[in-house]
Image (cartoon, rainbow, N blue to C red):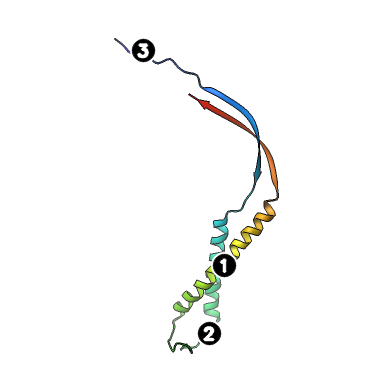
Amino acid sequence: MAEQPAPERKPLVHEEIVTLRVRRAPKYGVFLAAGALLGILAALILTFAIDGADISPYTQVVYTQLQVFGFTALICVVIGATLGAVAALVSERVVGRRVRDVAVDHERYRY
């Protein structure tokens, strides 16, 4: 006895036009990463621009330039990321005011 193919079912389609509001928003991760990168660049510039003494007057320890860069980078990266977050918030306030209405064709298929 041969199997008969199942009858084809037609999908149930529900279609409607919906109006949506579209608002652009900045990507916060990009702003934070850019701020952190600028903080590393600032730390690099500060490390080579400031000529420190050989011995720290407070701890009586000699720090290498790499250690000074590390300490400075810790501070500058946090400041840069914070400034990047503030720039993202300001950007959202400026760009977020522009809202557009868009007509969207919404279709639902059920098999």
Please tell me the numbered disc located at residue 9.
none
Circle 2 residues within 10 Å: few <14, some 14–19, many ≥20: few
Residue, x 67% and y 38% (percent of image)? 102
Q: Residue at x 51, y 22 (%)?
A: 11
Type of the residue with mark 2: Asp
Above or below residue 80? Residue 71 is below
Of badges 2 and 1, the one in the foreground is 1
Give the label on residue 51, or none: 2
Quadrant of the image containing the N terminus: top left
Cβ–Cβ under 8 Å for marks 2 and 1 = no
Which mark sits nearer the N-terminus, 3 or 2? 3
- Mark 1 is surrounded, within 10 Å at the Cα level, by few (under 14), some (14 to 19) or many (20 or more) other residues, namely many
Task: Give the SS element for disc 3.
Answer: loop
- Give the mark nearer the N terminus: 2 vs 1: 2
Q: Which mark is residue 80?
A: 1
> In x, y percent, where is residue 54?
46, 88
Q: Horizontally, is 70 left or right of 35 in the view? A: left
Query: What residue sits right under mark 3 in the picture?
Result: 4
Residue under the image location 56 percent in, 72 percent down = 42
Q: Earlier in the sequence, mark 1 or mark 3?
A: 3
Question: CA–CA distance between discs 2 and 1?
Answer: 23 Å
Q: Is residue 63 above or below residue 4?
A: below
Dot 3 surroundings within 10 Å: few (below 14), some, or many (20 or more)? few
Judging from the image, what secondary structure is the residue with disc 2 in? loop
Image check: 82 left or right of 94? left
In 3D space, how far apart are the residues under numbered discs 1 and 3 (Cα atoms)? 69 Å
Q: Amino acid at mark 1?
A: Gly
Is 101 placed above or below 67 here?
A: above
Amino acid carrying mark 3 in the image: Gln
Q: Are marks 3 and 2 in contact (CB under 8 Å)?
A: no
